[in-house]
Amino acid sequence: MNKITKTIKTTETPAIRQPAKESPITRQPVPEALELNYMPYAMSVIISRAIPEIDGFKPSHRKLLYTMYKMGLLTGGRIKSADVVGQTMRLNPHGDAAIYETLVRLTRGHAALLHPFVDSKGNFGKQYSRDMAFAASRYTEVKLDSICNEIFSNIDKDSVDMVDNYNSTTLEPVLLPTTFPNLLTTPNQGIAVGMASSVCSFNLVEICNTCAKWIINPNLDIMKGILAPDFASGAQIIYKREELEAIYQTGRGSFKLRAKYRIERDRKNNICIEVYEIPYTTTIEAIIDKVVALVKSGKLKDIVDIRDETDLRGLKIAIDIKKSADPDRIMRRLFDLTTLQDTFSCNFNFLIASRPRTMGIIEIFTEWLAFRMECLKRRLRHDIDRLEKQILLLEGLAKIAKIPANIDRAIKIIRQTELEDLVVSNLAEAFEIAESQAEYIAEIRLRNLNSQYLQKKVAELDDLQQQLDDLKKLLDDDDELRNFIAKELKAVAKKYGSPRRTEIIEEEQFFEEKEEIPDYPIKLIVTEQGYFKKIANLRQPTEQNVKEGDRILQELETSNIADILFFSNRYAVYKVRANDFGDSKAAVLGDYLPNLLEMDESEEICYIHATLDYSGFMLFAYENGKLAKVPLSSYEIRRKKILKAYSEKFNLVGMAYIPNDCDIFLIRGNDKALVFNTAILTPIATRNSNGVQVFTLRQNTLLTTFKPLFQPEEETEKYRIQKIPSVGRTLQIEL
């Protein structure tokens, strides 16, 4: 038994060592990873998705419209949208939801375009509504609108390049041969990687007529013809010539749009403001939500109710106000605080030969004209080739038809030829004509082999030759081509043009008078946890109610017409008018500032100041011993949030407002102190300046205490210095 056991033990198979598994993580240098992985994605987004091209379309628009064109939807009745979406997947391999959303925006029912490309039936939502959802594709019907005749003009005559689709089963156009500058009449917005495009729409008549005149006279002042942008949503544009000139010349800039409203009064003298056109950049829901928030916060006190009364007749926002209120003054306030007045930012960024370019209107006209001329030349070459082939065939027929006996001879040759394949060659040899001509003759039906038919066909030669000469002359004459394009543009403007929808208001017509704000003394209180109160009755008890565990950070007295500056620990300043806050009482906790100011997460208010005239200075003290003296006037700008309000390079020890120069007491660590007057500091207009070195620090020491001395203090005089920077003097007191 022991022998057996021993044998078994000695003959055990040794354990087989498994090879180490390779790590799924491979190391790759960052530049190589960006080049191989990120850059192809970025280029794909720029070229194949987000940026429109010279025909005014993004690839998704072009694929959808071309699919509808090939489906024969330029004529006939509408078909189900679901059918169009399904067919479009042959060119655009995306989900049906993405394709349908693209279709919705192009429809007449969605009301996003001045000249919709899709005639629609059914519910397609509205561009001016965030919550008005469009119906499913199985319920709606579409076809191409008549303006698409200009979009696909002569596309079947080789006017543009055709390429394989994604799986090489069919062809699709690289561009569409639009007969007018569609890229300026259709609004477009797209965000790519590292760049974006934002194009406003212009009136078709203004664009086409101005472009036609510019083609004839390149020195034309286009501002006389293109008055201002025009939007499907209507509203009003506040005209500032310098703003529009910048956009027209550079392709960049912005302008303001304002809603249209009317005032209705009933028999009981109740007042209702009806807003019936809003800026293209906003929605009904965004406006109503903002107004409701302003009313709840106490910033708007005369609004009783606001309703969305949009129906089949069009958009309408109804705002009920108090009988004693001035509706025009309320609207001025709403324009200032809501998107009833909004800004449209322009960035005319287009793909030209697969390269993004930001262009002004003249540059756009130039590039579009070059593109359109190339389309026309390609179409002319196609027509010339067709005519030359037709003339060649008729010349062969004329050679036979001019002698009646030749007709009988041709019939005899065809009948006596035993093999079908030899008919064409026998005819060509007998009459000394080309095989293509012989093929044409051989294909003539027996009933047409009579003198009347043949003479009629031969008589077409002169007309065809004249057409050919005219086409060749046009092809070789660029001036004639430009004149032809100009005539096309005028015809498009006459056929499809419509009056302006967006009203132009001169700058001086736009009222910007300040609302009369009641002036009375107030006290401002802010706590460490971010609660804020505006106390109107200064005779109230001084003891303020604060949240458990919270304490008052700062309180100051000012006027109800003052501007309040809230300095945050994220180097930002929030500007709010005191009148925008409702009056509070000592017993309440107050308003929560992070919500009111829309602050970032973990951002806190560390200092506040109220001002009427932006006089005086802000002092910022940093751990490295530097102080910055910034004029308060540097913050007098029309922004509700100012970034880089002070330096973020060094840790802040403290900040303070000083109306005039005063003494400042500083302590370094626990050993040195100094006092100096801020008159020796030079004011720095740059808000985020690093400041001036005041305290010379030793290694491993920091500035720890910063205190303005508005009243002289005898115990600090021993630390006074006259020049900076200074190492300070030995600290002998405790604060």
Image (tube, grey):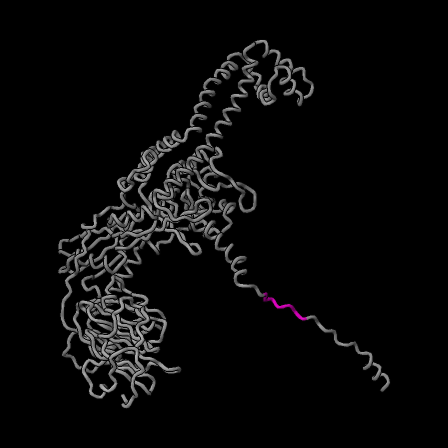
Q: Residue at x 39, y 46 (%)?
A: 106
Q: Residue at x 51, y 54 (%)?
A: 40
Residue 76 shows up from this direction: no
* Number of numbered markers: 0
Q: Is residue 344 above or below residue 424?
A: below
Residue at horizontal 65 percent and vertical 15 percent from the top: 415
Q: Nearer the viewer, residue 251 or 687?
A: 687
Q: Report whether 455 appears left or right of 180.
A: right
Residue 527: x and y in percent read 27, 78
Which segment is the magenta one? Answer: 20-26
Q: Position of residue 320 (x, y in %)?
A: 20, 58
Q: Quadrant of the C terminus?
A: bottom left
Residue 30 located left or right of residue 424: left
284 in relation to 220, above or below: below
Q: Is residue 224 above or below residue 27?
A: above
**Residue 191 in picture, x, y percent from top left:** 41, 54
Estimate the x, y position of residue 624 in percent, counting from the top left: 35, 77
**The quarter of the displayed image where residue 635 is located:** bottom left
- Name the residue nearer the viewer: 171 or 654: 654
- Give the camera-side residue of 632 and 147: 632
Q: For residue 432: magenta? A: no
- Asked which quadrant contains residue 396, the reply is top right
**Residue at image coords 24%, 83%:** 720
State whether residue 169 appears in this view. Answer: yes
The overriding secondary structure of the stretch rendered in magenta is: loop
- Residue nearest the observer in this picture, 144 or 728: 728
